[in-house]
Image: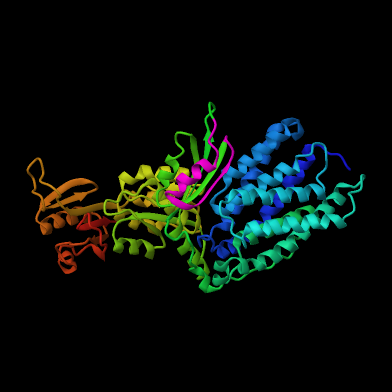
Amino acid sequence: MPQSNSSSSLLRFRAILGGALVALEERRSEINDLNVFPVADGDTGDNMVLTVEGCLAELDRLAEESGEHSLDEIGREQIVDLVARAALLSARGNSGVILSQLIRGAAEALISRPGVLVDPVLIALAMQRAAARAYASVREPAEGTILTVMADMATAVTAALEGLEPMPFDATADQQNRRIADLLEIAVVAGEESVRRGPELLPVLKAAGVVDSGGYGVVVLFAGCVSALRGEQGLAVAHYAVPAQSSKPQHESSTFRFCTNFAVTASSAGQLAESHDYIALLEQIGDSVLVVGDQVTLRVHVHTDEPQAATALFTDAGQVSRLDVADMSAQIADRDGRLAGAAHSRCGTLAIVAGDGIAQLYRSLGADVLDGGETLNPSTYEILAGIHSVPADEVVVLPNSRNVFMAAQTAAEMSERVVHVAQSSEMQAGLAALVAAHSDLSAAENVVLIDQLLESVRSGSVARAARADVEGRFEEGEAVGYVDDQLIAWGEPDSTLREVIERLAQGSELLTIIAGAGAPIDQAGVRALIPATVELEQHEGGQRSRWWLLSAE
């Protein structure tokens, strides 16, 4: 049998992973739209792409750092550990975590025979080990999913070995690639048949009229491997249309809001407990629990309403990193929107708001919104989930409160997306500045435009005093008026509002006033306070914290 060092083996492994990534990227949206199990959050394609990208990045880093040294000198065991760890750290969601286990199993087998070229026998072994690792990672395996598809492909490839002649000792690299590609084509054919049978094995797929997204994704992945080995167009894998009724399937995880993913790394002085030790604790606060890895690195996935409680279980065990929290209800709505023909943008905006009317105003300008509650004080986890619900590659966050800015910055740093936080400290100012954003620009470009416009917007507000002033200027229940956070008026609502309007109207052409819940003066009364030289826009915001929010441009 031909001999080869691990460098050539790893280069082939890198090449087929590169082909897999290209194929997954081409059908990423289609895989996302097929995603209905266990939750119709429409991110299977994204998760699989992220996992493969992480492995490729680690292989490229190894190659770059090795310099003139071959990968063989790095050590086979170290390479396996690094690639497996990269897959773990990059994995997100059920599909990403399971795929990371497929990659780990395959990597272990592919370089388990020192000095031996990757051949059909080793490929079959890799697929068997990949399937076994994937099944072992799931506490309650569901047939008809990626697990079944991978097992069926491994079985078909193993059976095909009996009819194959041994690899010639003097086979060229091209001949070797063709033999491996022919074997993987058998896997793809078997995988397609397994995908088609999936709805008969998993009722939720049949009810939704779709095939399993993860199973379909792994077939696409292997077809990309064949393309890379043959150096030509990939295999013709069937496309699957998504019927409209599949957008709202029933599933067992509908009671939990956040898809929470993170990595845990052991401290240098200790080791992590076995993964199963954490599963029961996580199942007390959520479902769809996956904990995979070893005593050095774990990858955790759980659907829960309490992301902070999930991470807290591991804070004494090691370092928590790579935190990703996605709002599944928003993801499901995003998937429904895609199926209804909504466009995916380069850059979107997430506005943190309070009040149904204000939320609608932001949506009318193309923004996604996150309800910050009456106090406009969402958690970092809620902001992170909001970021990931925006149907765009990059995101600008409008915190709309100085108290939210730090949490928004932290969420932006946690996110795997490109996220920039604008300097908006008031909802009315953020609304006025939002017109500067363009969906075809980058987040970096948009945040500059938004911040520039914010500099020309003046803000004001009138609210009910929650308590008496210690300086004796006003009593509880009277009106207090602010311009750019400075208290300038107090007393009766009409006189206080008039003073704020006069201050903001000076040198302004447009005045926007957003009435809150329980505002003591109606729109006609407010209009009577406006100078004739200023154009007025009035809206009902529904916010409870302020009677009126004002902005002047």
- Give coordinates of residue 313: x percent, y percent: 44, 40
Q: In the figure, 393 relative to 89: above or below? A: below
Locate residue 450, reporting x and y percent: 40, 52
- Residues drawn in magenta: 271-296
Residue 275 at x, y percent in the picture? 54, 41
Left or right: residue 75 compared with residue 539: right
Q: Which residue is at the front of the view, 376 or 260?
A: 260
Residue 273: x and y in percent read: 53, 36
Task: Decide which of 170, 166 is in the foreground and name it.
Answer: 166
Q: Quadrant of the C terminus?
A: bottom left
Q: Nearer the viewer, residue 445 or 66?
A: 66
**Can you tell which quarter of the image residue 90 is in?**
top right
Is residue 98 visible in the rendered image? The answer is yes
Residue drawn at x 54%, y 64% as measured from the top left: 36
- Can residue 231 be seen by looking at this rendering? no
Work out which quarter of the rendered image holds the N terminus and state it: top right
Numbered-mark total: 0
Answer with the quarter of the image where residue 544 lies.
bottom left
| Residue closest to the far top | 269
Is residue 285 one of those drawn in magenta? yes
Q: Residue at the spot x=69%, y=56% of the render?
A: 151
Is 183 included in the stretch rendered in magenta? no
> Residue visible at 47% across and 59% down?
253
Side of 272 relative to 458 (left or right): right
- In the picture shown, does residue 213 fall above or below 379? below
How are the colours assigned in the image? Answer: rainbow
